[in-house]
Amino acid sequence: MQFAEDRERPTYKATKDPDMILVKVHKPIPLFYFDMAQTQEVDPAVIVPDDVTEDTDSSLGEDLQSSTASVSSSILNYRRENGRTYHAYKDGSTGIWAIDYADEHPEAQVTGVDLSPIQPDFVPPNVNFVIDDIEDEWTYSQPFDYIHSRVMTSCISDWGEYLTKCFNNLVPGGYLEIQEVDVNIKSDDGSLSPNNIMLKSLALLNEASVMFGRPYLDILSLVDMMRDIGFEDVVIEKFKWPINSWPRDKKAKLLGSWCYTNMACGLEAFTMAPLTRAHGWTPEEVNLWLVHQRKAMADRNTHAYWPLYSIYGKKPSKEN
């Protein structure tokens, strides 16, 4: 990766926000219902755009915003920089996935690994949270039947080491599932201009991730990496996550509305630190840039989406 400029760079460690779930199952349950006969990449059908009656996304009502919102008062305890509240070291997310999984699988014991205790006080009896950095040594007393890892790109410095830890901490026949979003948005119909500000912003974030020593992940490389480590029946499935409500399909439109809500609300949090720390921008320059980026994100004439991947594989039932 070539940097845009050659001036001396400050060194920073990117804030990490892992979302990893480990499951110990007391009795066998079918965790997957897919055909695992061979490695495959499933290309989803082209999403048909809806007729545009207004250019910008106006589908974000109060009910949608409330359905996608989550907040913890504990975020107020952490450090502030450029008007943003940031995670402290060993700090993380709210544990919603682990809680939902535990509710749906009462026969399983679910362990959520995070960097700080910001999860709810009341959780199902079969879920517990461990405050730990997954890049440190794993010291769990028992292996797991299923490990779920989600949106860890640019959080892991050595993916080979991380996947090896997952492999070594699975029971024979256990599964690892990785869900990752490709940060490079795409369009199937050419409506995403090469000069779109969203692409320019992503290029800047990618450069910053390299400077931080945690570059964005080449997601497709995980398939061969998992095989080399020893996983078998590795499957990759590809989905499309519309950037706003441009699709005609009702479900895809709703997903796009959720996506826009997430991204528009979190855009400053995603970009402020990389652009100020790595690229030397002022907070005012960042906020002005984001005004134009939010406008581009809301443009329903741009039929763009985030590629989303689910990759899963099995530890052999018998050790070789």
Image (spheres, rainbow, N blue to C red):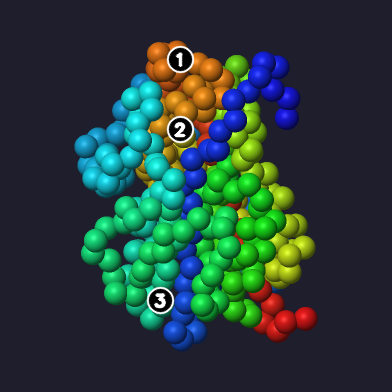
Query: In the rendered image, which quarter is residue 186 located in?
Result: top right
Local packing at callout 1 (Cα closer than 10 Å; few below 14, some 14-19, many 20+) is: few
Position of residue 129 measured from the top left corner of the image (x, y, whole percent): 38, 64
Give the residue pinned by disc 2.
270
Left or right placement of residue 61 versus residue 238 in this view: left
- Label 3 crowding class (10 Å Cα cut-off): few <14, some 14-19, many 20+? some
Of the two numbered discs 3 and 1 in the rendering, the one whose residue sits closer to the viewer:
1
Q: Is residue 41 above or below residue 273?
A: below
Residue 239 visible to an observer of this rendering: no
* Crowd rating for badge 2 (residues with CA inside 10 Å; few <14, some 14–19, many 20+): few
Q: Nearer the viewer, residue 104 or 167?
A: 167
Name the image quarter holding the C terminus. Answer: bottom right
Q: Mark 2: which amino acid?
A: Phe
Residue bearing mark 3? 109
Lower position in the chain sequence, tag 3 or tag 2? 3
According to the picture, the residue beneath numbered tag 1 turns out to be 282
Q: Residue at x 67, y 16 (%)?
A: 7
Identify the secondary structure beneath mark 3. strand
> Along the polypeptide, which appears first: circle 3 or circle 1?
3
Residue 223, placed above or below residue 187? below
**Residue 8 screen position, x and y as percent:** 66, 19
The reply to whether callout 3 and callout 1 are in contact (CB within 8 Å) is no
Instruction: Report the Cα–Cα distance between label 1 and label 2.
Output: 15 Å
* Real-space CA distance between mark 3 and mark 2, rounded to the nearest whole angstrom: 33 Å
Q: In which quadrant will I find the N terminus?
A: top right
Q: Residue 280 appears at what percent x and percent y?
A: 53, 17
Marked residue nearer the N-terminal end (1 or 2) = 2
Dot 1 falls on a residue whose secondary structure is loop
Element on which disc 2 rests: helix
Q: Which residue is drawn at the image coordinates 44% and 45% (left, top)?
A: 89
